Amino acid sequence: MDQIRVRTTGIALFGTLSVLAWGTTAPAAVTDRLPEIHGFVQAHAAARLGSVECAPRTTCSWPYNEQRLQLKTEGDGLEDALGYAAKLDLLHDAALGNLELDVRKLHADYNAERFTVRVGRQVVTWGVADLLFINDTFPKDWVSFFGGLPLEYLKLGSNAVRLDLFPEFSDLELVLADFRKDRLPDRDRFVLPGPDIPTALDEPSGLEASLRASRHFGSWDAALYFSHTHYRAPALSQEGGRAGGQWRGQYPRMNAYGASLSGSLGSGVLSLETGYYDSIEDRDGTRPAIENSQTRFLVGYSRQVAEDTTLGLQAYAEWMHHYDAYRRALPEGFPRRDELRTVATLRFTQFHIHQTLRLGLFAFWGLSEHDGYIIPSVRYTFSDALWGEVGANLFVGDRAGQFGALGDDDNLYATVRYAF
């Protein structure tokens, strides 16, 4: 039997009430026109490739089979001083038998000359990297990403208050948000290594705070970042020893400090980004269940290499601090991570037939872990309202690596969307 779930809490609910109160009490001059409602209907399915033995709870042959209706609207008033936006998805997940209302965006805005305020459910995106995240510590949906859903579904909305300030020396952005965890692969759709361990998760309460300061220098954009946040993947530990204690998961606190720089170089765009993750609850590296502090680096370059053809390359590294302490504390039999994890990416995009046909390839290669993740795709735009895409998610290489661990989850996907 279908289950119905609604994703909207906390600050997002406050944003909803703000929009409704404003819309019902604003004078006629403010609401002199009815908001237009747009959206789309979309069908998406993905079939697992190859013969794989799945656990009883796992949807094996067709891990993705969904139909989605999105409705969205936005408006403003008082000479653009007030605004609102809403984006709601009604999703029928035939693979899991769920019916779900997903509040993707729902916020009210106030715009002044030197600042803006946004309250409610909103998507926040920081940093200059392409599908590699350093200073973007906001929640993400890896289940949708690994299943081939459109890229917009990788980012999850945060229930937040966002304040943008525009002093002369810099643009400042402050975000106060409720905690929201990443949506990680689970055994409902994925064939994962290791046993299925029931785990009680303790989600944190209280606000997270993030601050970005950015400025233009000619053709270059520079930014500094700080986030007082949490790791969005749980740290698992077993109470009562390895013999039979209950497993629990927590989301440890961390501080993230970083910087980015991007701009034109030659005939392309150079991107540089770095960040330091201060693992507040394991600063000496002796608790192997919790991430060690680490420094992350990225350099990327993209350019047009031919007519309607672009190529982008990135090199990325994670350096784990206190590695000797981590090795000493790691229990016997647990896999050991590398002190320096390195990844390279490639993005290739080419258009044909008056840019109605798009050929795409994005590839991750784990240089240190000897694995990879390859995403080829073909999209055709039939009209302004209708497009379709087919593609694949292919996980290759060492099964001990981050991508190789999903080696039984290769899939071929197809998406059709009609907008109105």
Image (cartoon, helix red, strand yellow):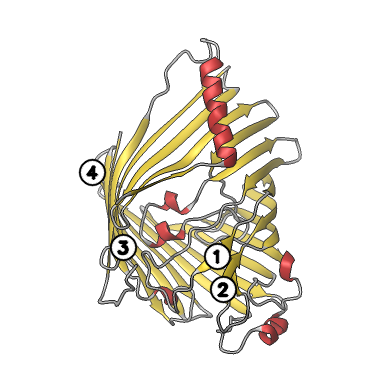
Q: From the viewer's perspective, tell me whether residue 242 is left or right of residue 325.
A: left
Q: Label 3 amino acid?
A: Pro
The disc placed on residue 382 is 4
Task: Read off the residue under disc 1.
Answer: 200
- Between discs 3 and 4, the one toward the N terminus: 3
Residue at the extreme top? 28
Q: Distance of mark 4 from mark 2, alpha carbons?
A: 54 Å
Q: Label 1 amino acid?
A: Ala
- Between discs 4 and 2, the one toward the N terminus: 2
Occupied quadrant, residue 323: bottom right
Between disc 4 and disc 2, the foreground one is 2
Q: Distance of mark 4 from mark 1, alpha carbons?
A: 47 Å
Q: Distance of mark 3 from mark 4, alpha carbons?
A: 27 Å
Q: Distance of mark 2 from mark 1, alpha carbons?
A: 8 Å
The residue sitting at 75% across, 35% down in the picture is: 167
Q: Secondary structure at mark 4?
A: loop
Q: Label 4 amino acid?
A: Phe
The residue sitting at 62% across, 86% down in the picture is: 331
Q: Is residue 315 visible?
A: yes
Residue at the extreme bottom? 332
**Circles 2 and 1 in contact, beta carbons < 8 Å:** yes
Q: Count the marks: how many?
A: 4
Between disc 1 and disc 3, the foreground one is 1
Q: From the viewer's perspective, tell me whether residue 353 is left or right of residue 315.
A: left
Task: Read off the residue under disc 3.
Answer: 63
- Between discs 2 and 1, the one toward the N terminus: 1
